């Protein structure tokens, strides 16, 4: 029997959906390079979601008002935030290997 992830109910569905859509848009092929360059300029590691949100990098990549993604994230419950963090971490692993190589410093753990 294989591993089956438990389903955890989303409590703040609107905020979760809006933030998930913004993050998915950030990782779209036409915006990912802009996003990675912005992280590189600010010297922010890609896995540090809190720093990414504090710097409004997601908002600048999507063209949203500064602070939008951060506000949505802060409105989530702790369990919703954990699920959003998992979604974000899965998206950063889907970035093309060539781009990951070009921005390898962002992907380093330390």
Image: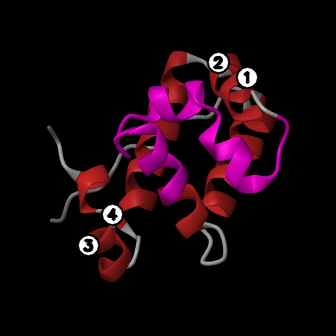
Q: Which is closer to the viewer, label 4 or label 2?
A: 4
Residue at which label 2 appears: 74
- Quarter holding the N terminus is bottom left
Residue at which label 3 appears: 101
Is the residue 62 above or below the residue 48 in the image?
below
Tell me, yes or no, whether the two marked residues, 3 and 4, touch with CB atoms within 8 Å.
Answer: yes
- Could you tell me residue 107's position as x and y percent? 26, 53
- Could you tell me residue 10's position as x and y percent? 62, 34
Tell me, yes or no, whether the two marked residues, 3 and 2, touch with CB atoms within 8 Å.
Answer: no
Tell me, yes or no, whether the two marked residues, 2 and 1, touch with CB atoms within 8 Å.
Answer: yes
The secondary structure type at the circle numbered 4 is: loop
Q: Which is closer to the viewer, label 3 or label 2?
A: 3
Residue 2 belongs to magenta span: no
The secondary structure type at the circle numbered 3 is: helix
Q: Which mark is residue 55?
A: none
The secondary structure type at the circle numbered 1 is: helix
| Magenta span dominant secondary structure | helix
Q: CA distance from mark 1 to mark 3?
A: 31 Å
Among the 4 quarters of the image, the one containing residue 74: top right
Q: CA distance from mark 2 to mark 1?
A: 5 Å
Is 29 on the left-hand or right-hand side of 1? right
The secondary structure type at the circle numbered 2 is: helix
- Could you tell me residue 32's position as x and y percent? 56, 67
10 Å crowding of disc 3: few (<14), some (14-19), many (20+): few
In the image, the segment drawn in magenta is 37-65
- Quarter holding the C terminus is top left
Residue 52 belongs to magenta span: yes
Q: Which mark is residue 103?
A: 4
Of the pair 85 and 13, the residue shown nearer to us: 85
Residue 8 in sight from this viewpoint: no
């Amino acid at each position: 029997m294989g591993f089956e992830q438990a389903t955890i109910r989303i409590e703040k569905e609107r905020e979760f959906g809006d933030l998930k859509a913004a993050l998915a848009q950030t990782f779209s092929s036409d915006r990912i390079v802009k996003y990675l360059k912005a992280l590189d300029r600010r010297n922010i590691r890609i896995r540090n979601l809190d720093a990414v949100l504090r710097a409004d990098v997601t908002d600048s990549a999507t063209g949203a008002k500064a602070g939008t993604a951060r506000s949505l994230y802060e409105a989530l419950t702790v369990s919703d935030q954990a699920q959003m963090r998992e979604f974000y971490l899965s998206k950063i692993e889907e970035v093309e290997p060539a781009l990951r190589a070009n921005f390898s410093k962002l992907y380093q753990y330390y």
